[in-house]
Image (spheres, grey):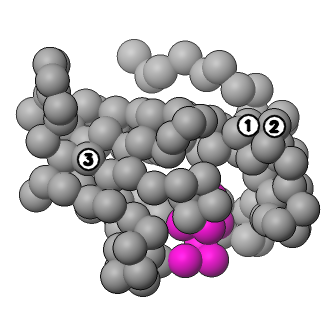
Amino acid sequence: MPPRRRVPVTAGRAALTTWAADPAAADRPTTALAVRFTLEELGIRAPGRSVEVRVPPFGVVQCVEGLQHRRGTPPNVIETDASTWLALAVGDLDSAAAAGGGRLRVSGTRADLTAYLPLFPHDEAS
């Protein structure tokens, strides 16, 4: 059963488009909505519970098929800030560059989203 959407697709796409047009000018509510929308989309495109993606303080999603995490700190975690996550989601930044620059913290052998990113390349985000 696919996860239930909490962010309407039209509202989420609008927030992502606004953010992508000028990240520095996007306000906090728009950024938060874009992050939540893209995390939900990741959960739909990569269903599972073996990797936890955290974008504090806006959201978290468990995704990618494999062994399910049930309690405590998950073994496969990806954590980043909102601007880095959204740049990854639209293809302005790749995971290796983000991790190399210390903007993406990755732990665990399955914590790799390169097969799923970008979620919305610029031609789709608009």
Q: Secondary structure at mark 1?
A: helix
Image x and y of residue 95, in percent: 40, 73
**Horizontal side, residue 85 vs residue 45: left or right:** right
Which quadrant would residue 20 be assigned to in this image?
Answer: bottom right
Q: CA distance from mark 2 to mark 3?
A: 25 Å
Question: What residue lies at 63% left-to-right and 44% top-to-bottom?
Answer: 35
Q: CA distance from mark 1 to mark 2?
A: 6 Å
Q: Amino acid at mark 1?
A: Leu
Q: Amino acid at mark 2?
A: Pro
Q: Amino acid at mark 3?
A: Val
**Horizontal side, residue 119 vs residue 110: left or right:** right
Circle 1 crowding by C-alpha within 10 Å: few under 14, some 14–19, many from 20:
many
Asked if the residue under mark 2 is in contact with the one under mark 1, i.e. CB atoms within 8 Å, the reply is yes
Q: Quadrant of the N terminus?
A: top left
Image x and y of residue 105, in percent: 32, 61
Residue receiving disc 2: 29
Q: Quadrant of the C terminus?
A: bottom right
Q: Secondary structure at mark 2?
A: helix
Residues rendered magenta in the picture: 86-93
Tell me which label, 3 or 1, sits earlier in the chain. 1
Question: What residue lies at 42% left-to-right and 34% top-to-bottom?
Answer: 61
Which quadrant would residue 108 be assigned to in this image?
Answer: bottom left
Q: Secondary structure at mark 3?
A: strand
Circle 3 crowding by C-alpha within 10 Å: few under 14, some 14–19, many from 20:
many
Q: Main secondary structure of the magenta part?
A: helix
Residue receiving disc 3: 77
Q: CA distance from mark 3 to mark 1?
A: 22 Å
Whether residue 126 is visible? no
- Observer-side mark, 1 or 2, equals 2
Residue receiving disc 1: 33
